[in-house]
Image: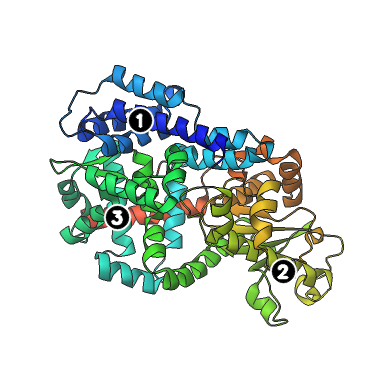
């Protein structure tokens, strides 16, 4: 390590030692309940988020489980919590110091900050539930659901029923604590005790379990990286958002974090445990879903699929070619997420998501060349007057993935074909999450806006001004009708099964 590294490590050591001395005196269960109440209050009253950043509150619960001394059980109160928060907010952390000392480090710093904070500030409403219900359809994921039933005694439908029932119950509680017995009356006969037990086993942990998960993460990233990235790690509650209490209750440390688990939990579980079978099945489902999004928003446009192109050529091709009035929009689907624990440059470069996106760039470029060569004219028609734009669509959002830094440092080194010609496109292909694609299509549909114009305006202003696509289109909060329909269908079926009668449900969008 350099002298600067030693100084930075010393600051990180001091921060952790002081944090340990502050937190070791509080009983983990009492501390968790107190701080979880604060998190759920702050989420609804965001003006106080500056004093009580949610990511620091959540980190303090994990740190308390790690550092608590079993002979210390002092009562926690607001004054004590304020002292702990001052320690966090006054601390100039090593990631900021390392990256912001170099102008080339601005983008990676913002990537880390986004990963640290944004997922805790995000809401997971009807659109998110509707999307998840459509993506995890048994007709596409037969092997995946069979695995879930065999190992965890859960069908997709049971997973969503239990998750939604718990979330609905938590919404009415001041303290976000639920019990298994609540579900017995809520879910009806189609949800058995073994299903409920299995669900809670997946989504919950104990204070000792928090310690085990955190220690495992620290081992994976290494001692120094664990020290530097400590407050940036998406820790134990990211994977297990319920804390099991000694009286048998289950504390939701952050209600929206639990909802994220309901929506993305099947993906997280099966990607880890049956990566090959799940990857193939989810890839097909994801590609089909992207097609459904496109057809819902631009039903009268010509949509050419990979299957159509395969009848003409065996060269690399993308999943969809959209023929619009002013442009050709190429789309390649990659149902991926960023999975590394830290967002260091090497970790990002070697992550599977990066390799998939780089492959996507090659497929988009190959399709663009065929269009320019006139090879697809019988399918597409004359394209001479049309602008050419493209996107790689991902399952989860990759922060700052469209910056020049990200392309030069992360994506480009993974592109196998170094001769790809990005000059074929009027705007460099954009990396867009499925949620962002929905918002883009919704915006175009509602505003009668040309997609090239939207891309030019967003990209032309620069990423530091506009942020990611989800930030750029944040003012568009309208619900998406076909996602709302999917959720309403599920909700009506859920209520009818529970109460065994027809009930009209009014969905608050």
In the image, is residue 47 above or below residue 373?
above
Is disc 2 placed on a helix, strand or loop?
loop
Q: Position of residue 446 (x, y in %)?
A: 64, 45
Q: Which residue is mark 2?
A: 417
Closer-to-camera residue (210/37): 210
Q: Which residue is mark 3?
A: 161
What's the distance in space between the residues labelled 2 and 1, CA to CA? 49 Å
Q: Position of residue 233 (x, y in %)?
A: 43, 43
The quarter in which the C terminus is drawn is top left
Q: Is residue 147 visible?
A: yes
Q: Position of residue 215 (x, y in %)?
A: 33, 48
Q: Which label is found at residue 17? A: 1
Report the colour scheme. rainbow
Which of the marked residues, 2 or 3, is nearer the chain's N terminus?
3
Residue at horizontal 48 percent and vertical 37 percent from the top: 117
Judged left or right of residue 328, residue 85 is left
Q: Residues within 10 Å of mark 1 (few under 14, many from 20)?
A: few
What's the distance in space between the residues labelled 2 and 3, CA to CA? 46 Å
Closer-to-camera residue (289/15): 15
Which of the marked residues, 2 or 1, is nearer the chain's N terminus?
1
Furthest residue toward left: 247
Closer-to-camera residue (499/35): 35
Q: Residues within 10 Å of mark 3 (few under 14, many from 20)?
A: many
Residue at horizontal 14 percent and vertical 41 percent from the top: 246
In the image, is residue 360 above or below residue 220?
below
Closer-to-camera residue (309/204): 204
Residue at horizontal 50 percent and vertical 43 percent from the top: 115
Between circles 2 and 1, the one closer to the viewer is: 1
Q: Position of residue 294 (x, y in %)?
A: 61, 60
Which of the marked residues, 1 or 3, is nearer the chain's N terminus?
1
Q: Pointers 2 and 1 in contact (CB under 8 A)? A: no
């Amino acid at each position: 390590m350099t002298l600067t590294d030693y100084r930075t490590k010393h600051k990180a050591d001091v921060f952790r030692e002081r944090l340990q001395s502050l937190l070791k005196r509080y009983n983990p269960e009492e501390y968790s309940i107190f701080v979880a109440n604060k998190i759920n209050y702050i989420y609804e009253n965001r003006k106080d988020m500056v004093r009580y950043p949610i990511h620091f509150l959540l980190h303090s619960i994990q740190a308390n489980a790690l550092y608590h001394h079993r002979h210390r059980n002092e009562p926690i109160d607001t004054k004590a919590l304020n002292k702990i928060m001052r320690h966090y907010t006054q601390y100039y952390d090593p990631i900021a110091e390392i990256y912001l000392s170099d102008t080339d480090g601005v983008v990676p710093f913002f990537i880390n900050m986004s990963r640290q904070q944004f997922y805790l500030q995000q809401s997971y409403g009807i659109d998110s539930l509707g999307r998840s219900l459509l993506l995890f359809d048994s007709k596409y994921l037969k092997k995946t659901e069979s695995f879930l039933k065999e190992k965890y005694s859960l069908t997709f439908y049971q997973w969503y029923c239990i998750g939604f029932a718990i979330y609905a119950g938590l919404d009415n509680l001041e303290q976000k604590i639920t019990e298994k017995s609540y579900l017995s009356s809520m879910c009806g006969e189609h949800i058995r005790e073994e299903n409920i037990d299995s669900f809670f086993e997946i989504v919950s942990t104990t204070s000792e379990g928090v310690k085990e998960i955190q220690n495992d993460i620290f081992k994976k990233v290494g001692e120094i990286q664990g020290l530097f990235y400590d407050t940036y790690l998406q820790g134990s509650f990211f994977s297990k958002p319920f804390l099991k209490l000694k009286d048998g209750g289950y504390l939701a440390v952050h209600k929206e974090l639990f909802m994220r688990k309901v929506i993305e939990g099947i993906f997280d579980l099966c990607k880890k445990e049956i990566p090959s079978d799940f990857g193939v099945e989810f890839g097909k489902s994801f590609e089909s879903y992207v097609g459904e999004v496109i057809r819902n928003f631009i039903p009268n446009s010509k949509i050419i699929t990979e299957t159509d192109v395969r009848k003409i050529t065996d060269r690399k091709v993308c999943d969809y070619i959209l023929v619009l009035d002013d442009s050709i929009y190429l789309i390649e689907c990659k149902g991926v997420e960023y999975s590394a624990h830290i967002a260091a440059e090497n970790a990002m470069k070697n992550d599977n998501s990066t390799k998939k996106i780089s492959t996507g760039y090659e497929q988009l470029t190959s399709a663009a060349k065929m269009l320019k060569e006139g090879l697809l004219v019988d399918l597409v028609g004359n394209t001479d007057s049309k602008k050419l734009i493209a996107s790689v669509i991902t399952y989860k959002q990759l922060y700052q993935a469209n910056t020049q830094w990200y392309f030069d440092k992360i994506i480009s080194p993974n592109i196998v074909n170094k001769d790809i010609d990005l000059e074929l496109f009027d705007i460099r292909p954009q990396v867009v999450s499925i949620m962002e694609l929905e918002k883009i299509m919704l915006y175009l549909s509602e505003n009668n806006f040309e997609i090239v114009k939207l891309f030019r305006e967003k990209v032309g202003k620069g990423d530091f001004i506009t942020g990611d696509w989800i930030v750029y289109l944040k003012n568009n909060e309208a619900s998406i009708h076909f996602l709302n329909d999917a959720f309403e269908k599920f909700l009506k079926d859920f209520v009818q099964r529970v109460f065994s009668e027809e009930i009209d449900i009014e969905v608050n969008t």
